[in-house]
Amino acid sequence: MKRTKNILSVLLGVAFLISCVEVDKEVNKIGDGPNLAGFQDAAQSVTFIADGNEYPVYVKVKLTGPNLSKVSGDVTVTMAADPSSTAVENTHYRFDNTSITLKENQNYLGIFEFTMLTEGIRAPLAESPVLVLTASDVTASANIVGSGKPNIITLNYGCPSELQGTYDVEVLRDGGPISPYSVVNIAKLDIGVYRTDKVGHWDDIGGTPGYTFYEVCNVITGPQQNLVELYSNQVQNITGSVNPDNGVLQIEYEIYSPSWSSIYNTTYTPQ
């Protein structure tokens, strides 16, 4: 019986050693694997006004892998549009250069730049074109290949949008007129992004006054947001439109809390 136990112990020990050797082989395979040249982001979205101008788009590129410490010298990465792209070259975008050099003295981080075109584009488009960008080829002295993972870039075209200014305002709360204020100033935060300086039925309740909304080709929407970025009450369901003939804004939104909620219908008339 004792001899049998010894034999079993030896067999188990041999099996364990074989298992460890196999694991070490797999680890060594990983350690000997190639470094990868690819993108920092799997997807990104850019928005520019369709005004006939050309705009630069920047894509972050980097080198990763198990043997970065062994890499020396610069690495050249060639970019290409995957056939699955719906964006059309020389209509929606243009490559002035198709390659980028990742430099050793910059830790193999770089920016690939291409040009987004708006000439001849009439916004809004039914669907935003998508450029599927790939690292198609790599030139380097070390064991480096393209990552194979694309960067999916959505090219959004906006209409000219200049809603910033001073407006006379009429407010209905749950269908009834209220008059906590009669003038509202709207500031432009970014392309198609705006913020009023009044919200709800208060003239001033602290925090960051007003609410943020988006405008794309005369259609107004907005994100759900904390009331004046201070209270837990939510400003939500923001919808509206811009009258292109007279610049009047019609915006409806809800202010919600667990204890009450109200619908506000607002009419902003430019002064």
Image (cartoon, rainbow, N blue to C red):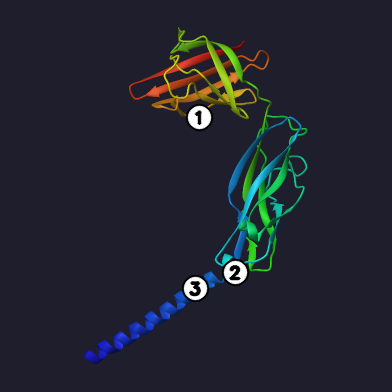
> Is residue 147 shown to the viewer in this render?
no
- For the residues bearing labels 2 and 1, Cβ distance under 8 angstroms: no
Three-letter code, disc 1: Pro
As drawn, 123 above or below 142: above
Residue beneath disc 2: 70
Q: Label 2: how many residues lie within 10 Å, few (<14), some (14-19) or many (20+)?
A: few
Q: Earlier in the sequence, mark 2 or mark 1?
A: 2
Instruction: Estimate the x, y position of residue 56 in percent, counting from the top left.
Output: 70, 41
Find residue 34 and report its horizontal and vertical position in percent: 60, 67
Q: Nearer the viewer, residue 241 or 192?
A: 192
Give the spatial CA distance, label 1 vs label 3. Answer: 49 Å
Marks 2 and 1, Cα distance to the nearest angstrom? Answer: 47 Å
Q: Which residue is mark 1?
A: 223
Label 3 Cα crowd, 10 Å radius (few <14 / some 14-19 / many 20+): few
Side (left or right) of 167 relative to 115? left
For residue 207, above or below residue 1? above
Cα separation between marks 3 and 2: 20 Å
SS for dot 3 = helix
